[in-house]
Image (cartoon, rainbow, N blue to C red):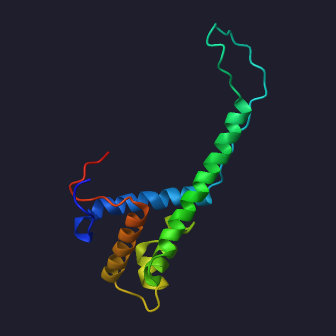
Amino acid sequence: MGQPISYANIDRQKTTEAVKEALEQYRIYKYLTFDAREANTTASYTERFHGPTNVTSDQTANIAIYNVDTEAYQAAYCARIERAVMGLPEIEAFLMEKRYLTKEYDYITDKQVFGFEFDPPISEGKYREIRWRAFRSVALNMKIAVIKGQKEE
């Protein structure tokens, strides 16, 4: 548990990468349809060797548990990201929503956001400063901030 977290101790590049990965996962969970598993009802004839007789398997229950747990996990993950972003100052939350939380992520560039979404438009340097503050806050909130000198797991 080494050094306490301070803004100066945060590795900017690795934390930015971690936040971008988390936001990518958010978009996958939020905008792609969850493909629920279904039980196989076709009989299969396989040779069964003697094994533990006290072990039972319930394919339908396992599939139902998987479907419910996975969907609940994805919804909770999205809600957690959304709470982290909504807790940001207005300008940072606006930037995150317009650039990273949208379905159109692959078609929107940073230049479009700082040049056209902000009224009045802001400079690229100011945009990067606001984005870093937003990323840093989201990373700390999500507990994914990377500390300088921290060993990767």
Residue at image point 25% right, 48% down: 151
Q: How many numbered circles are shown?
A: 0
Question: Which residue is nearer to you in this view: 124 or 132?
Answer: 132
Using the rendered image of the protein, determine whether residue 37 is visible from the camera's viewpoint: no
**Residue 121 occupies quadrant:** bottom left
Locate the C terminus and report the quarter of the image it occupies.
top left
User: Closer to the camera, 91 or 52?
Assistant: 52
Residue 107 appears at what percent x and percent y?
Answer: 51, 68
Q: Residue at x 66, y 53 (%)?
A: 33
Q: Is residue 14 visible?
A: yes
Q: Position of residue 115 (x, y in %)?
A: 42, 83
Left or right, 125 with respect to 48, comes to left
Q: Nearer the viewer, residue 153 or 91?
A: 153
User: Residue 54, relative to residue 128: is it above or below?
Assistant: above
Relative horizontal placement of residue 133, taking residue 104 as reference (left or right): left
Residue plotted at (35% across, 69% down): 136
**Left or right: 23 with respect to 127?**
right
List x then y, in percent, for residue 142: 43, 62
Q: Residue at the spot x=34%, y=72% of the render?
A: 132
| Above/below status of 127 relative to 50 | below
Q: Residue furthest top?
A: 50
Q: Eyeballing the image, is 140 above or below 120?
A: above
- Residue that protrudes farthest toward the bottom in the picture: 120
